[in-house]
Image (cartoon, grey):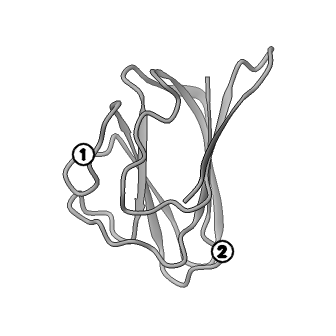
Amino acid sequence: MAVTVTNQSNPLGSKIVQDTGATGTAVNNTTGGGGTLFMVEIDNSGFGTAVYFKLANTASATAGTTAADIVLLCPASTKRSYVFPEGIAFSAGFSHWCVTGAAQDNTSVPSPTPTVRYVTS
């Protein structure tokens, strides 16, 4: 799994977080603090089962234990984008994981793993 964060120059003042192997293990505090979420793109085009991308307003999460603040569905064999024009504020940080079930205790890892990107400020 490779996670990259790209700082964007003004006027956006945003970061693009890309996880090329989103799994059932939480990636913690990807942006180094709070911010505003504007867009999430989930590329599940190579996987025959739906996946659930989970994002928590915390600097440290544990998949299967931490309650996600946002849960986004991406159907099998598709790429889906979610846009939040007004943004969704996060105060503590952005921690994320991706699993094959919506339930909070689900830690089933998708295979192959999807690529997920999100834009924050």
| Placement of the N terminus among the 4 image quadrants | bottom right
Q: In this view of the protein, which residue sits in the foreground, 17 or 39?
A: 17
Q: Position of residue 36 (x, y in %)?
A: 53, 24
Left/right of residue 94 with respect to residue 68 in the rendered view: right
Q: How many marks?
A: 2
Q: Position of residue 110 (x, y in %)?
A: 45, 74
Query: Is residue 42 depicted above or below 30 in this figure?
Result: below
Outermost residue on the bottom side: it is 48
Whether residue 21 is visible? yes
Q: Distance from label 1 to label 2 (Cα)?
A: 26 Å
Q: Which disc, if any, is residue 8? A: none
Query: Is residue 101 depicted above or below 85 in this figure?
Result: below
Q: Position of residue 24 (x, y in %)?
A: 37, 62
Q: Position of residue 43 (x, y in %)?
A: 64, 64
Mark 2 falls on what kind of element?
loop
Residue at the image position 48 percent from the left and 74 percent from the top: 50
Disc on the earlier residue, 1 or 2: 2
Whether residue 83 is visible? no
Residue at the image position 56 percent from the left and 27 percent from the top: 87
Disc 1 marks a residue whose amino acid type is Ala
- Name the residue carrying label 1: 67
| Placement of the C terminus among the 4 image quadrants | top right
Left/right of residue 85 with respect to residue 108 in the rendered view: right
Outermost residue on the top side: it is 10
Mark 2, Cα crowd under 10 Å, few <14 / some 14-19 / many 20+, is some
Residue at the image position 40 percent from the left and 40 percent from the top: 28
For residue 70, what is the image quadrant? top left
Mark 1, Cα crowd under 10 Å, few <14 / some 14-19 / many 20+, is some
Left/right of residue 100 with respect to residue 104 in the rendered view: right
Disc 2 marks a residue whose amino acid type is Ser
Residue at the image position 39 percent from the left and 19 percent from the top: 91
Q: Which disc, if any, is residue 45? A: 2
